[in-house]
Amino acid sequence: MMDYVKNNPFGNVESLQDSSQLGLRVREKRKADGLTQQDLAAIANVGVRFVSELENGKPSVQLDSVLAVLHALGLQLMLSDR
């Protein structure tokens, strides 16, 4: 389950535990933005297959492509100490 951290300088932050949670969040944001997988792939300059695999939680995906998809959705990857 995703943990939500609120009231921080970066806005709402989610703690994700695995690739399937990342994929779920990407799918939710894509749909909330009214985009198809094809739309998102074109905006992020990645393949539709990549978007599908990312949304389905494939554990081995290219980080630069993940970052491109997140950027296209207005999301960012952040690291923090536990």
Image (cartoon, grey):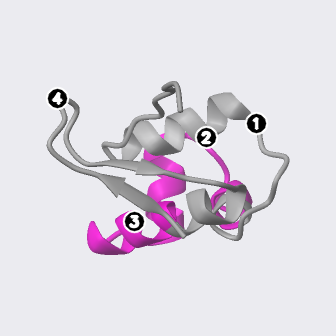
Q: Disc 4 marks which amino acid?
A: Pro
**Residue 76, horizontal then vertical, whole percent:** 40, 35
Q: Is residue 37 magenta?
A: yes
Q: What number is the disc on residue 62?
A: 1
**Residue 29, horizontal then vertical, whole percent:** 36, 64
Range of magenta residues: 25-52
- Sequence-wise, the earlier of marks 4 and 3 is 4
> With 41 as the anchor, is 8 left or right in this view?
left
Q: Residues within 10 Å of mark 1 (few under 14, many from 20)?
A: few
- Sequence-wise, the earlier of marks 2 and 4 is 4
* Cα distance between the residues tagged 2 and 3: 13 Å
Please, what is the dominant secondary structure of the magenta stretch?
helix
Q: Nearer the viewer, mark 2 or mark 4?
A: 4
Residue under pointer 3: 30
Q: Is residue 70 above or below residue 77?
A: below
Residue under pointer 2: 66
